[in-house]
Amino acid sequence: MDILRKLVFVLLFALPGLLYAAQPININTADKETLMSVNGIGEKRAEAIIAYREQHGPFQSIEQLLEVQGVGPAILDQNRENLTVKSEQ
């Protein structure tokens, strides 16, 4: 019974995180904390992404992230499925 209780406890706290992670992050609207939830994006890179979009306007594609200093192909490739530039409708 104790194992079942622990399993329910874990599911109650893990499920919202899993559901949130299933929704792509819009790099045109995400705040710094949200960007920092992306693998390989820390505080400095998140700030660089925000500064880039403020200076150049919205990203037209995910690949345009490569123009941000500190964001390379490895970061883009490991996060490609979890990022978007389109608004959900």
Image (cartoon, grey):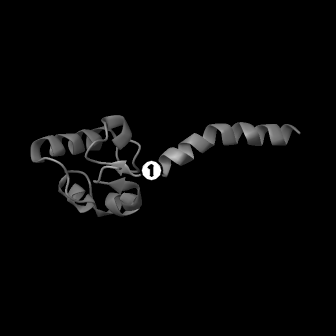
Residue at numbered disc 1 = 23
Q: Is residue 2 above or below residue 75?
A: above
Pick whichever, 86 or 31, lies toward us.
Answer: 86
Residue drawn 20% across and 53% down?
Answer: 59
Q: Position of residue 87 (x, y in %)?
A: 30, 49
Q: Amino acid at mark 1?
A: Gln
Q: Is residue 15 above or below residue 60?
A: above
| Circle 1 crowding by C-alpha within 10 Å: few under 14, some 14–19, many from 20 | few
Q: Residue furthest right?
A: 1
Pick whichever, 64 or 78, lies toward us.
Answer: 64
Q: Position of residue 39 (x, y in %)?
A: 41, 50
Residue drawn 75% across and 40% down?
Answer: 8
Q: Quadrant of residue 4?
A: top right
Residue drawn 34% across and 43% down?
Answer: 35
Q: Quadrant of the N terminus?
A: top right
Q: Position of residue 36 (x, y in %)?
A: 37, 41
Element at label 1: loop
Q: Residue furthest front?
A: 89
Q: Residue furthest left?
A: 55
Pick whichever, 9 or 85, lies toward us.
Answer: 85
Instruction: Count every numbered label the image shows and give the total.
Output: 1
**Could you tell whether 87 is left or right of 21 in the image?**
left
Pick whichever, 41 or 79, lies toward us.
Answer: 79
Residue drawn 57% across and 41% down?
Answer: 16
Q: Position of residue 34 (x, y in %)?
A: 37, 39
